[in-house]
Amino acid sequence: MERGADPGTGGRARVRPDDPPLIQRVRGEAFEHIGRGMYDPWSFDVDALPPYLVELRAEREREILRLQHDLAEAPRASRTRVETSDAQAGNAATTVRHLERRLAETSRQEGVVRARLDHLAAAEARRRPLPPDPGAPDDKAPPPDRPDEADVPGADAREHCDHDPHPHECWEGLHTEPPLRGRWKMGILLGLIGVEVPIQREIFRYFHGDSIAQQIETWIFTLPVAAIMILLPHLSGHLYRGRHVTGSERVLGWLPLALLVPWFYLAYVLGGLRAKVLLVPPRGPDGELIEGMSPVDQLDLTPSTISVMYVALLLITGGIAFLMGLAREHPLQVAYRGAYRDRREAEAGLVAAEPGARDSESELAQARADLEEQTRFGDVRLEEGTERIHALYDQAELAYLEALGEAVGAPAFTEAISRASQALHQGPRRPRAQARSAGP
């Protein structure tokens, strides 16, 4: 027996596997209707449309309405897609333009700073000339072939150094370790202040006394004076190192050094006071000074030696603080490092943003093409879709009637089915005309 056949219909197949799903469904419904006795050779009316075909035609109209709705919604969805893609492409293009401007500006700044550094290196080489290098190329010889550096930031400004037969007259670049970091400087400065505190405390303790109130007063004087004796030379060195910053005041060339004059005087006075305090003889039980009992006398030291020692100690700590103020990169090196870092960041951002911008432009172009196609061919698609739906349901109607004839198998019923099928083909199709004229 054939697959899908009904035993009560002589082995004839209800469903044909190669038929579309709609045809398979209506054939199955036809066999079910015959099985329930809805039709027979004596009561089948050729002139009346079977009820199931009425339902099938209603289903066909619903499919046409759904097609009209989908085709009407498609342009609106495409317009929304175009608007979204346009906004995304605009944002991506704005980001790329911003990064391009930033890259151009940082590259220009990097080139300007590099040119000034090369000029500074050349001036320093002229002040301190190096011995001639036997292996150096001849000054009259043409420069060696070099790759195209038109895209290298500051290439024009560095053209002289790139082809200079004396490279020691050009800046060596960011290949040296920067001076002390901020944390190291802070730790060393605090250590130097710690060296100053005992010296200053003994001086002020001698003038104030040992009571609690007097000790508080002693510390009020000790800590600020110790900090000033370290921070003043450090600040002078820091300002003096930055005197070449563009826009800096001319006084920075001499004012930081002038601040060291009162500092030298303070170091001399405080060092002398500390020596004198140390040279004071101790007091006896009655509060009177005991002559000849000074620790210095016991060590066979002279007052001048003690004074020079403390003054030298204060000068050493202050000198170290001054050198730490100088121990930072040249302002042009700091500017070049910042410009180099900003340029690398702009390049990385541009490399990351360009693919997204290209994808946004492609998405926008595709969305516009889809919208144009839907706008231009919407009516054609509606017509073609309506034709396909009508053809499919016409085929389904004929398949239903054909399955009824196969299920019954009587010649008279088959003849009636044949006349009904001819009437379906010859009858007017007013529903199809209405579907074609309807719009979204």
Image (tube, helix red, strand yellow):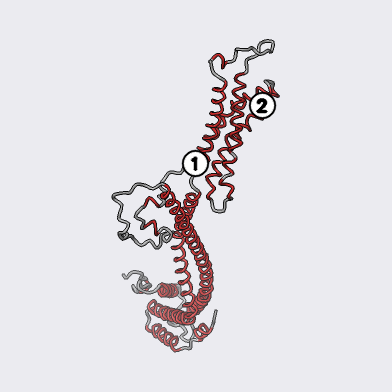
- Other residues around mark 1 within 10 Å, as few (<14) / some (14–19) / many (≥20): some
Front-most of residues 217 and 112: 112
Q: Is residue 58 visible?
A: no
Q: Identify the residue position indicated by label 2 in the image.
A: 218
Residue shown at 59% from the left, 41% from the top: 258
Q: Amino acid at mark 2?
A: Thr
Quadrant location of the N terminus? bottom left
- Res. 400 image quadrant: bottom left
- Vertical position of residue 45 compared to residue 311: above or below: below
**Residue topped by disc 1:** 327
| Label 2 environment density (alpha carbons within 10 Å; few <14, some 14–19, many ≥20) | many
Front-most of residues 169 and 59: 169
Which of the 4 quarters of the picture holds residue 294? Answer: top right
Q: Position of residue 391 (x, y in %)?
A: 43, 81
Q: Mark 2 falls on what kind of element?
A: helix
> What is the quadrant of the C terminus in the image?
bottom right
Identify the residue at horizontal 39%, vertical 74% (top origin).
Answer: 20
